[in-house]
Each structure stands twice: as C-alpha cells, then as structure tokens.
Image: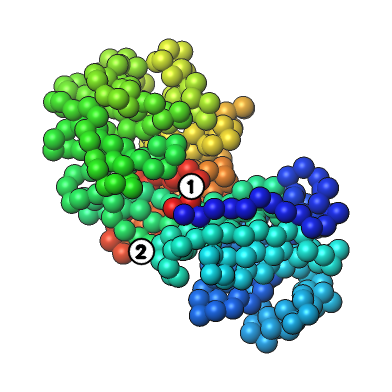
C-alpha cells in the first residue's frame, strides 16, 4: 500500500499564495519548468521517464528533459547545480531516490536555492509492476498540486468496451487489461471511490456491479427488455440507468442495496438514456428523443423540472447525445452531428454557449477527467476507433489506446493507493 508522509516544508518561502505550496516563483500564465534529476538504481530511468511524462500529459507543468550529460551536471555530488538549473529556466528540481521501503522525494526551489519539500512514500510493490507505476503516478500528482495548486490526474484510469469485454487503461496509456469476462457487458462507469464499476448486460438483460479488488460481480436489477447506460450517484448510494420493454426507454434509479427500480423520466415512448449527474448530485443531464430527435436535457435528481439544455435544432444537425457533466459543474460535454459526422462539443451551463472541440474524423462519447480540463473520447482519426485525450484549454490531443476498435469510455475519479 502507498502511504504519504505529512508535508514537511524546510524553507521560510512556504508561506506562498494559497494553492502553491512550495513558493515557486514563475509567471502564473505559464507552466513552471521542472527538472527531474537522475534517479539511482536499475529502474531509475523508468522512474524519471514516468514522472516526466506525467508532467507532460497533465499540461500544467513543463518538464525540462535533459540529455544524460546535462542531467548529470545538474545534479552534482554536493547538491543541485543552481546556476545550470537557472540557466535551463527551471523553477524547481525534483529528486526521487528509491529506498528499501519505497521512495524519498526532495524538491528544490531554484529561485531561493533551498530545499522546499521532503516526503517519503512507502510501497512494497515490485519495480515495473502496475502498483509500482501507480505509486509514481501518485508522486507526480502530489508534485503537480504542490507546484500549481491543482492535483494531477496521472493516477487515474479509463474504462472502455472492446471485443465484448470491459477493459481498463492507465491515464498514460499503459497497463491495458480486461476487467470482465467475455460476454455482453456494455456502458461501464465508476463509483465515486473508484473501487467498483457498474455496467449493463444483454443476456441476461440487467444492470450489474463489479468489485474490482475481488473480481466479484452481482446483478443489481434485471428483467425483460433493455437495460443500458448505468451511472452511480455522486454519493455512491444508488445507480441511475435506462430501461425499456416495448416502446421507448426511460430512466430509473435503484439503491445499491438492490430492489426494484423507481422511474425518473416520462418519455412517452421516446428514448431517454445516458444519464450523468451534476457534481452535487442535485441534477441529471441526459439524452432524450422526446422532441422527435435526440437533444440534451436536464432534470432534478428526482425526475422533476425537466429542461431542454441544447438549442433545439432542425435538420441534419439535429442529433445530440452522450452527455457528461464536468467535475467542476461548469460544462456538459456531448456529441453532436455536424456535417454528416459526430463531433465533441461543450455547452456552458451559465450562458448556454456552445464550443466545438473536435473536427478531425468522427468523435463521440466524451468522458471528463476529474480535473475538469481533460476529456477522453472515441475517434476514428487514426483509421480505427480508439480512445483519445484532449486538453480543452490548449486543444492538444494524444492517442490513449491502440489495437482493436473501442467504444464508450468512462474516466475514473482520482484513485486511492493500491
């Protein structure tokens, strides 16, 4: 198990502004430059590469990557080479040292030439194992929070469907593995703790929950008809899902303890699917065909006060689906048909302004990262339907999965230590 010692600041510079814990001096409109110093041991290069890549993928820190000679010069036997680090434009330098019980972390403030932060991380995981990598992702997330005031998303994962199974992949694209048996699982989503997932099945038709640590699954609700798109409530006490027998599909809620589902939506023969909760759990955004074509609506968590969220369109663009409410509550991401294909858009909950985020290929099924800045979605831009990650602030994107086609991703909450 990964444990984190209490923050132990060693410098008077730690009375920094709220959110920036170690008193770095850098332009708030830029990304602080950080050097990860060479790491000793047989897995040292991997440690350094993982943390540097986490910084890069987080899009809030500029990892200053050095060649071997420069890296060696930056970390002299007597301590950090302050003049060289300053010349490289580094606001901070990070030293990670493997120990018998885990990792020792030291962070150096280049401007003050002082040690700004020391922490010890304990992990019994073997080098290169999944848990060992997760421990390093946790260190990177801690550092991003210390440098910028915003916790990173390196120690998160993404669920997705592939080949009649549910799979999971780390946020950096590593450790792709199945979490369900071969069958017909659909529409996976996470509980708030990241320890349990829910999904729908076709045969038998129903909604199941799976404990990821034990691998045990149980049926939450089942019966005739179709069951799709289940999601946990933000407090983890219930699951909202779509169910229909004959004409139309409506939203229902069921407590995690089980029992019969209680109907939330009244679609009068239309399809009402893809629920997503607001962060406070008071509202639900969903797709409905009640206007004659799919649009995005919101309603109170008890099914009352239904409101059309997206502008009512007529024509070929009149198809909006797969909404996901951002963790900060400001935006809803969804897919919309534009020019004969799907693209990912957001709508601002304050003024209902729309913003198109993608244009390359077909892009659908967006899911927010817990930082509210990154989205994963399915795109065929590489020729095969794969997961991509987008930074909505810069427009930078990267491919997350490779191989056989995938669909319906769900980004995890920030995960606890393993």
**Residue 44 in sight in this render:** yes
Q: Position of residue 26 (x, y in %)?
A: 80, 58
Q: Position of residue 225 (x, y in %)?
A: 16, 27
* In front: label 1 or label 2: 1
Query: Where is 340 relative to 132, above or below?
Result: above
User: Who's the residue at 85% across and 54% down the image?
Assistant: 13
Q: Nearer the viewer, residue 172 or 304?
A: 172
Image quadrant where residue 163 sits: bottom left
Image quadrant where residue 353 sits: top right
Query: Where is 289 relative to 319, above or below?
Result: above
Display colour scheme: rainbow
Q: Which badge, 1 or 2, comes first in the chain's sequence?
A: 2
Q: Which residue is mark 2?
A: 402
User: Who's the residue at 54% across and 48% down the image?
Assistant: 374
Q: Position of residue 341 (x, y in %)?
A: 38, 46
| Label 2, residues with CA under 10 Å away: few <14, some 14-19, many ≥20 | some
Query: Where is 1 relative to 40, above or below?
Result: above
Q: Position of residue 134 (x, y in %)?
A: 48, 58
Name the mark on residue 269. Answer: none
Residue 155 appears left or right of 150: left
Q: Secondary structure at mark 2?
A: loop
Q: Which residue is mark 1?
A: 416
User: Who's the residue at 33% across and 23% down the image?
Assistant: 255
């Amino acid at each position: 198990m990964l444990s984190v010692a209490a923050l132990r600041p060693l410098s008077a510079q730690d009375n920094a502004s709220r959110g920036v814990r170690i008193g770095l001096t850098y332009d708030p409109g830029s990304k602080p430059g950080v050097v990860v110093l060479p790491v000793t041991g047989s897995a040292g290069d991997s440690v350094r590469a993982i943390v540097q890549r986490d910084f890069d993928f987080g899009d809030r820190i500029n990892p200053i990557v050095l060649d071997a000679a420069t890296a060696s010069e930056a970390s002299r036997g007597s301590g950090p080479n302050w003049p060289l680090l300053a010349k490289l434009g580094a606001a901070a330098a990070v030293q990670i040292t493997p120990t018998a019980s885990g990792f020792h972390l030291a962070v150096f403030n280049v401007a003050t030439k002082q040690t700004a932060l020391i922490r010890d991380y304990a992990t019994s995981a073997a080098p290169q194992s999944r848990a060992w990598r997760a421990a390093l992702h946790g260190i990177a997330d801690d550092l991003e929070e210390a440098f910028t005031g915003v916790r990173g998303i390196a120690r998160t994962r993404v669920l997705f469907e592939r080949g009649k199974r549910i799979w999971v992949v780390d946020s950096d694209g590593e450790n792709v593995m199945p979490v369900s048996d071969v069958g017909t699982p659909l529409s996976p989503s996470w509980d708030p703790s990241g320890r349990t997932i829910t999904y729908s099945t076709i045969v038998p038709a129903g909604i199941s929950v799976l404990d990821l640590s034990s691998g045990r699954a149980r049926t939450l609700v089942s019966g005739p008809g179709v069951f799709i798109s289940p999601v946990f409530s933000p407090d983890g006490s219930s699951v909202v899902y779509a169910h229909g027998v004959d004409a139309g599909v409506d939203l229902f809620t069921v407590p995690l303890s089980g029992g019969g589902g209680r109907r939330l939506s009244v679609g009068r023969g239309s399809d009402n699917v893809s629920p997503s909760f607001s962060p406070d759990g008071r509202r639900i955004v969903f797709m409905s065909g009640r206007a004659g074509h799919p649009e995005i609506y919101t309603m109170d968590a008890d099914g009352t006060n239904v409101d059309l969220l997206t502008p009512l369109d007529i024509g070929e663009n009149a198809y909006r689906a797969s909404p996901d409410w951002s963790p900060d509550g400001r935006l809803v991401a969804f897919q919309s048909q534009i020019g004969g294909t799907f693209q990912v858009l957001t709508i601002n909950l304050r003024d209902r302004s729309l913003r198109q985020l993608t244009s390359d290929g077909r892009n659908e099924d967006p899911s927010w990262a817990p930082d509210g800045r990154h989205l994963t979605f399915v795109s065929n831009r590489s020729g095969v339907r794969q997961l991509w990650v987008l930074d909505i602030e810069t427009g930078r994107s990267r491919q997350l999965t490779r191989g056989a086609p995938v669909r319906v991703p769900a980004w995890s909450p920030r995960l606890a230590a393993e």
